[in-house]
Amino acid sequence: MSRIVVCCVILYCVALGFNLSTSLPNDGINGIDIVTEYNDSLSVINNGWHITDTYSHNNTTITIGIIIPFLAKFIPINLIFKVVFPVIFSLTPPLLFLFYRKFMGNISSFIGALFFALLLPTWQEVPAISKSELAEPLAVCALIVLFSDIKAKYLITSVLVIVTILAHYTVGFLLIFWIVAMFIMDSIQKQKVSKFLIPSVIAILFSLIWFKIASNGVVLYHSIKDMSVNPNTDPIVNRVVGETWGSEPASIKAQIIILYISLLVLVVGLVYIIRNYRQMDKRLLIGMIVCSIGIIGGILLPKWFDFILVTRWVQYGAILLSPVFAFGIEQIWRWLKSGYYRLLIDSV
């Protein structure tokens, strides 16, 4: 097998092992969102899918309205949530590796994809949100096609973006945001209107129409409401910034330490891509910078970035954030090999 295939297999196996470690324990369904998804899926199975019902945000997604009820005809519904969707979601790191290879070397691409697979929110939270488990690999497929040489890539990307939106509104919204940002950067760079405009406009128009009809606009209303800045810190934020450090168990303290080490590496990577922006693909660069600032800002200014830390930013932003981590690892490794740190220690 080629090295690329080996890397993809390793990434898939690592991701699948971690994802199943979250979804399989206990006999029931683990998580908060996924319990609602489970109940809503049963409702659809028993009563049919009526897209104008307002009983749940889940009613706007084909994940709950079509895919799970269809699979439930052949597979026990518990196994769909605990096994089938983690198996699908585990495709994301290998797909990311293939996407990153368009902009970076194999080693950097592998490190970035591995960082995504091992990131705590990736395997602790996403396997408890079946909508995300389907939407994230679709979103990466959309990005792969968008940056490919396929003749009909803008049309195919538009279809994939629409399916992503239908799979999970949050991932779909972030994907639209990224593509619009890439459209703006690509237009500035080429000094003419970029063809990235095609999937951007199609996705925005579809979202406005679909989410106005589905569940009577409940998704649009709550998305705008949830994005309002909250000056009061959340318990999760208090934990991350160390205000509850003394009362946390050792496992949580270890996770916080790992988080801060990862943030340090991200800062190094962010400095690197900013200093070397001329060598970067500007369309990907804008996404990496925005995601990095969002995560780092969420730590430094928790009272005002509360919504970033407790929404899905970390989970889904990692798609464009992981290459920054890879660049950070590379720079730290070069620094260690150079021996400069010894001079610094000796001078101290």
Image (cartoon, rainbow, N blue to C red):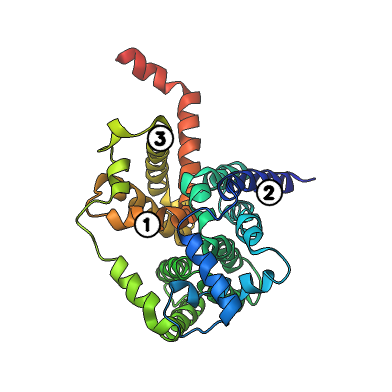
Separation of marks 3 and 1 at Cα, in angstroms: 20 Å
Residue shown at 80%/45% (left/top)? 1
Give the residue pinned by disc 2: 8
Q: Which mark is residue 261?
A: 3
Q: Nearer the viewer, mark 3 or mark 1?
A: 3
Dot 3 or dot 1, earlier in sequence: 3
Q: Is residue 331 above or below residue 321?
A: above
Residue 166 can be seen in this image: yes
Q: Is residue 113 left or right of residue 339?
A: right
Q: Secondary structure at mark 1?
A: helix
Q: Which residue is at 67% across, 69% downward?
A: 72
Q: Provide the secondary structure element on which disc 2 rests.
A: helix
Disc nearer the start of the sequence (1/2): 2
Q: Amino acid at mark 2?
A: Cys
Front one among 320 and 300: 300
Amino acid on which disc 1 is placed: Val
Q: Position of residue 311 (x, y in %)?
A: 37, 58
Q: SS of the residue at dot 3?
A: helix
> What residue is shown with label 1?
290
| In-image side of 245 versus 77 (left or right) | left
Do the CB atoms of the residues marked 2 and 3 lie less than 8 Å apart? no
C-beta proximity under 8 Å, tags 3 and 1: no
Seen at 54% across and 75% down, the residue is 43
Q: Position of residue 188 (x, y in %)?
A: 40, 69
Circle 2 crowding by C-alpha within 10 Å: few under 14, some 14–19, many from 20: many
Q: Mark 3, residues whose alpha carbon is within 10 Å: few (<14), some, or many (≥20)? A: few
